[in-house]
Amino acid sequence: MDKFETYEKMGIERCVFDYCERIAEKLKERFYTIDETAERNQLKVLHAFRKNQVQEACMMGTSGYGYNDIGRDTLEKVYADIFHAEDALVRPQITCGTHALALALMSNLRPGDRILSASGRPYDTLEEVIGIRDSLGSLKEYGIGYDEAPLLPDGGFDFGKIRDSLKPKTRLIAIQRSKGYSDRRTFSTRQIGECIDFLRSLRDDLIIMVDNCYGEFVEDIEPTDVGADMAVGSLIKNPGGGLAPIGGYIAGKKECIENAAVRLTSPGLGREVGASLGMMRDFYQGLFLSPTVTASALKGAIFAANIYESLGYYVLPDGSEDRYDIIQSVTFNDPEALMSFCRGIQAASPVDSHVRPEPWDMPGYDSKVIMAAGSFISGSSIELSADGPLREPYAVYFQGGLTWPHAKFGIINTLQHLVNDELIDRSLFK
Ligand SMILES: *Cc1c(COP(=O)(O)O)cnc(C)c1O
């Protein structure tokens, strides 16, 4: 059967299909280099599995206190090896990325200490963790201070401002790798390394924490390879490979991980408790698949960038630049187009494809957000998903795709939705 017919059955019209196919054709060489990175990361993961003798018993779960949980303890060694870190904490009891970051901060800081964000304003949900926006239980309530070094206009680290913002009480530096919901570029691991080297040249007593959300396995090195004391992330993003149903991780210095463990459970108990329940097989298998799943998501992001850029929209990153996370933003300057895009993603999803997303007041965010998430794991953003805050400039943040063919169809379907809603004119495809 002609390939178009399979698309036609899915509601895609000829001009949209042909336009997208022409763009996909041009990306083949680029995709080859992504596959090369996936290959290196696949072997890095497999090496850690072999070194730690991951075995059938690791797939079983424990219950109750979870003492001597070989699956959990081995998985943490596997993570530590992948990150070339001394240690790691990887648990279903870490409920999400925000929790993992909050845990890393709360456990490694004491009253009177200060945090310095070296990458400007942090991700929305961290504002309440830190107390930038007043919130019950924030670090601010515990007497932990906060300073911020804004980025340069070009999105780079402002080393002068970072130096000037260091205070005697500054104890921890937070660096966010991914742009999140902001209009800047994502940092490469190399750039993060330069910032860390600079900080170390000024002070040798700083804890450097990198919010690694969406960055795992995009490059063949991670922030802990360039000197970070902690890399922190969510298992319902890249490293869960779409299979982990919950969880977060912290990989880094032994002392930092120990602090996090006693805070996660209890002083005296630390990492010895925490049953893995039935999660382990999904954690291992998801981690094993993560390099190729991340590659699929990256291909989808690049495909989307090239399509919307060619239609005249502002896209970040642009169609040709290097990638350091899986997020793609497209700026519509129009709430209707933002919503139409998200509805196109939703309709292309394997779960809840019949659901029409509406903007809502999401906990932790300060404006309404529209989300398209027809995922197997609720809220998983390594699966094909899109979201955008309903505020100027009405940019959509698109990410994920467990397979490249699915990511590709999802993006083609967004374009079809924009055409159907008369927000993009067919004459543009000529
Ligand atoms: C997703 C994300 C978080 C928060 O993770 P959740 O799992 O949504 O709580 C933090 N920082 C960045 C950069 C993120 O992308």
Image: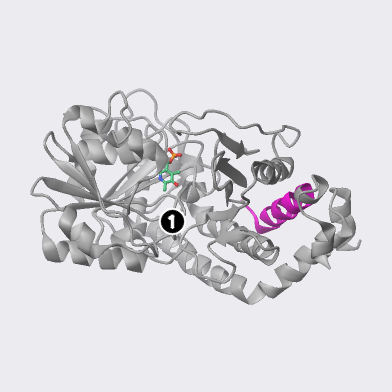
Question: Which sits in the foreground, 387 or 261?
Answer: 387
Kindly tell me whether residue 377 is visible in this rendering.
no
Question: Which sits in the foreground, 23 or 265?
Answer: 23
Is residue 323 rendered to the left or right of residue 345?
left
Residue 389 coordinates in the image, percent (x, y): 54, 40
Residue ID at (11%, 59%) = 203
Residue ID at (40%, 37%) = 125
Check the image and name the residue furthest to the left. 168
Kindly tell me whether residue 263 is visible in this rendering.
yes
| Residue 288 covered by magenta stretch | no
Describe the element under mark 1 as helix, strand or loop. Answer: loop
Question: Which sits in the foreground, 173 or 269?
Answer: 173
Displayed quadrant of residue 16: bottom right
Residue 80 coordinates in the image, percent (x, y): 31, 53
Q: How is the image coloured?
A: one colour
Displayed quadrant of residue 186: bottom left
Residue type of the residue flagged with mark 1: Glu
Is residue 364 rendered to the left or right of residue 137?
right
Which quarter of the rendered image does ligand 1 occupy? top left
For the N terminus, the image quarter is bottom right
For the C terminus, the image quarter is bottom right
Residue 227 coordinates in the image, percent (x, y): 24, 62
Query: Is 231 above or below relative to 366?
Result: below
Is residue 123 rendered to the left or right of residue 131?
right
Report the magenta residues as a range: 402-417
Residue ID at (38%, 53%) = 53
Residue 265 coordinates in the image, percent (x, y): 26, 29
Residue that carries the numbered disc 1 in the rendered image: 216
Is residue 206 rendered to the left or right of residue 20?
left
- Binning the other alpha carbons within 10 Å of mark 1 as few (below 14), some (14 to 19) or many (20 upward) gives many
In terms of secondary structure, what is the magenta stretch mainly?
A: helix
